[in-house]
Image: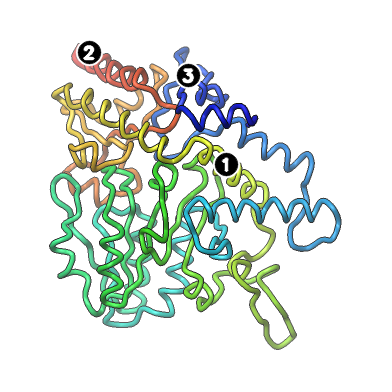
Amino acid sequence: MSDSTSTARSRVFDVDAIRADFPILKRKVNGQDLVYLDNAASSQKPSHVIQSLVDYYEQTNSNVHRGVHTLSIEATDAYEMARTKVATFINAPRSEEVIWTRNTSESLNLVAATWAEANVAEGDNIVITAMEHHSNIVPWQQLAFKKGAELRYLSHNDDGVIDLAGAGSVIDSRTKLVSATHMSNVLGTINPIAELAAMAHEVGAVILVDAAQSVPHMPVDVQALDADFLCFSAHKMLGPTGIGVLWGRYELLDAMPPYMFGGDMILEVTYEDANWNDLPYKFEAGTPNIADAIATGAAVDYLSELGMDNVWKHEQELTAYAMEQILSMGNVKVLGPQDPALRGGVISFIHDTIHPHDLGTALDQQGIAIRTGHHCAMPLVRSFDVVAAARASFYIYNTKSEVDALVNGISETEGYFSR
């Protein structure tokens, strides 16, 4: 991005200028202008991020931490600079606390296989919310089975808001870990992480935050949240697929055993034994995903230039407008908080007479991309006595006119199915 562009964006959030940075938004689908409303699954990528991948492979392509030649030094510098950018973005105290993983799912599994494996024992309990993604349910189910521990769930009301008053009877002296989504990928609910962290720490437990849906959309400060671990994926925040982040408190990460073994996570190897490298490299075995880490840094640059307060304000305004328009249809039920102030830019809904898959297919014919299904949160969706829901999710490049296109598309689909 040019300096002039950066300066302009720091003064005003210009959606039209932002849209011009995303090549895919110029595409037509089934003869219609693309309306991309599946951002909770994966965001689109600006030219700035795409070009960073091209530049790496055309100019710098080399392994990191292993060479003294120019290309290796340049690649290492860019790779570690990206780590520093991520640390600054989430206000981590130290860049060594940022671990590159493949995605949020791997980050959660890393904590389960290392910290939790060492610290959860028979009779202990792990507490999660009832609105978790499968990636924040299944690892704890499996660990509980293995350890003879109990998996407990924090309940929520009909609007999808956690019952904090009742949480005190769930989190107790045998709780070792509280693991909660910051923002639900189905309900859009923004959970009170700082309050949950205080409750966890009061009984000596640690808290892990699934921030896959929050870090891309709102200011996130790991110190203000008082989190112990926090994880997210680059592909949901303008970055490439196949790379994610685990942040953890230094003292916790330092005490944890490695997750995988191989090159670069080793300090010394003999025929008899091995010693592990320092943080963060202890958890990054083998040749890392260099290009995508650098591109993640480029995505952080882009979002930082926009300003996360501006990003969040845009999405709150768009979500409030979308909630009003969708609820006005009368034959659509929205899952989660009805108050837009309590949710992020994710709206899952159920039509009275049209199956979500039929609705999604019909909207695709109009160039509108939404998500349908259980959204990798099957227990949550089934708790509403349905097997699937439609979901529209918004980001920096979405507009009110696209919300109008969605609502009109639903109306047209109703007309088709009423023939």
Marks 1, 3: nearer the viewer: 1
Q: Which residue shows up at 31% across the image and 82% down it?
A: 122
Q: Are marks 2 and 1 in contact (CB under 8 Å)?
A: no
Q: Which residue shows up at 22% across the image and 23% down it?
A: 325
User: Depth check: 407 or 255 in front?
Assistant: 255
Q: Secondary structure at mark 3?
A: strand
Pointer 1 residue: 301
Dot 2: within a 10 Å radius of its alpha carbon, few (fewer than 14), some, or many (20 or more) residues? few
User: Depth check: 88 or 395 in front?
Assistant: 88
Q: Is residue 122 above or below residue 33?
A: below
Pointer 3 residue: 29
The amino acid type of the residue labelled 3 equals Val
Mark pair 2, 1: CA separation = 45 Å
> Residue 319: x and y, percent?
29, 31
Pointer 2 residue: 415
The amino acid type of the residue labelled 2 equals Gly
Q: Which residue shows up at 63% across the image and 73% down it?
A: 278
Q: Earlier in the sequence, mark 2 or mark 3?
A: 3
Side of 13 relative to 53 (left or right): left
Q: Are marks 1 and 3 in contact (CB under 8 Å)?
A: no
Dot 1: within a 10 Å radius of its alpha carbon, few (fewer than 14), some, or many (20 or more) residues? many
Q: Earlier in the sequence, mark 2 or mark 1?
A: 1
Mark pair 1, 3: CA separation = 30 Å
Mark pair 2, 3: CA separation = 21 Å
> Residue 75: x and y, percent?
74, 52
> Residue 38: x and y, percent?
40, 33
Q: Secondary structure at mark 1?
A: helix
The amino acid type of the residue labelled 1 equals Asp
User: Depth check: 77 or 62 in front?
Assistant: 77
Q: Secondary structure at mark 2?
A: helix
Q: Is residue 249 above or below residue 181?
A: below
